[in-house]
Amino acid sequence: MPPLFDWRFAADPYPAYAWLREHAPVRKTQLPSGVEAWLVTRYADARQALADPRLSKNPHHHGEQGAHGKGKVGIPGERSANLMTHLLNIDPPDHTRLRRLVSKAFTPRRVAAFAPRVRELADGLIDSFATRGEADLIHEYAFPLPIYAICDMLGVPREDQEDFRTWAGMMIHQPGSPRGGVGRAVKRMRGYLAELIHRKRAELARADGRAEAARAEGGDALLSGDLISGLIRASDHGEHLTENEAAAMAFILLFAGFETTVNLIGNGMYALLRHPGQRAVLQQAVAEGDEGLLAGAVEELLRYDGPVELATWRFATRELTVGGQRVREGEPVLVVLAAADRDPAKFTDPDALDLTRQENQHLGYGHGIHYCLGAPLARLEGQTALATLLHRVPDLRLSADPQELRWRGGLIMRGLRRLPVEFTAADGR
């Protein structure tokens, strides 16, 4: 069996996943943290596991007591920061209630209305490096764009957004970010969100006219204004959202809403730089305004080398069978999305990047009741970021040996630490 979870595996995990799919599609494996978990690598088994109600998202079902508190499972720092009650950690009926509430923020109408702001952010970031003729596309483009976008959507004031950029950099070990650990960054973010919720609640209480408008909207309070204000209005008008739930919800929307998009843009651009023929197809589509091909291209990039390598933790609430293997109560199950999305039983020529692929029911954003809530926004950001970059900087080229590039560690996400590029510098005049 090929080695798992070392730096060589991180650079290209797909051969090892191909071996697992063929020889041990559901295999118990010891993770770097010491926790043993089942890895599910075939598409059919993965899709079944993602939707199986016997696999709980709640870490309390884990048979190893205390593993979550020690940071072995889940998001580091979330327990100590009192951020447990978010969508990635709960099951129905609480999951149903919270998801119904927040889903109103990600309607097609609201996401479409946000498109001009995403384009403005993309253009502004390109402006900051266009005259230099070189850039690190992770640090200067893929990372800040979704941070500023989700901060805008949440209602974080512009003057505070650089703090979020710093904390987010600490959470994913971005080069140049202050040291101090993921847990410290999570606590700072949690403290800020709690203070912001208090401040916005006071502002909403003073604005009687706006409060009356929110009452008239009823359950659709999230359709107008920023997302945190919408959460407060809903909790004040019958949705029974606790303060901890509101803070945890804001945190997970920010956490899940930025790193996945960083990796979508970074991995996607890296794949295009390594496949010049496919990149030419996409550049022509961008020049011709072919939005259908652009949308399909982003779906293929999500399948080919997606931002989420493994789905977040699941725990068996009772004994069950997955892919012919008996999973006992309390055992963790990790669905390997990156392996399932290259399963030849599901996809024709799965190791090839084909931006015109028609049948593409990938699992990049999950499946079932935990399907990614922010997928419409992430798709918009990915499409806008790639199209704007290819239009503004058409002769991008990789300025480092691919063997020298390093991928960030961690089980769940897959993303480059840096992506250095060169191009013809724009005229500063």
Image (cartoon, rainbow, N blue to C red):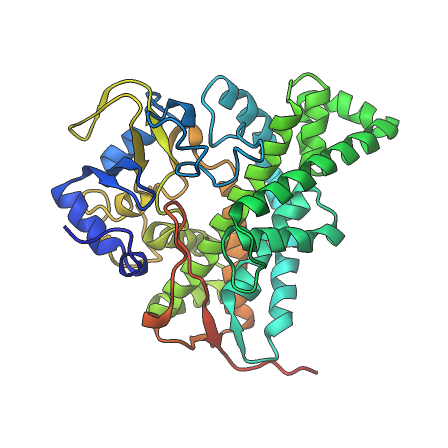
Left or right placement of residue 3 versus residue 75 in this view: left
Q: Please identify the quarter of the rendering in which residue 257 is found.
A: top right
Q: Please identify the quarter of the rendering in which residue 213 is found.
A: top right
Q: Residue at x 61, y 36 (%)?
A: 250
**Position in image of residue 319 (x %, y %):** 24, 19
Relative to 361, say whether 64 is above or below. above
Q: Quadrant of the C terminus?
A: bottom right
Relative to 118, say whether 389 is above or below. below
Q: Residue at x 43, y 34 (%)?
A: 371
Left or right placement of residue 374 versus residue 36 in this view: right
Name the foreground residue: 308 vs 215: 308
Name the foreground residue: 116 vs 49: 49
**Position in image of residue 58 (x %, y %):** 43, 25
**Position in image of residue 336 (x %, y %):** 30, 42
Q: Residue at x 18, y 39 (%)?
A: 25
Relative to 283, say whether 301 is above or below. above
Res. 209 in view: yes
Left or right placement of residue 48 versus residue 388 in this view: left
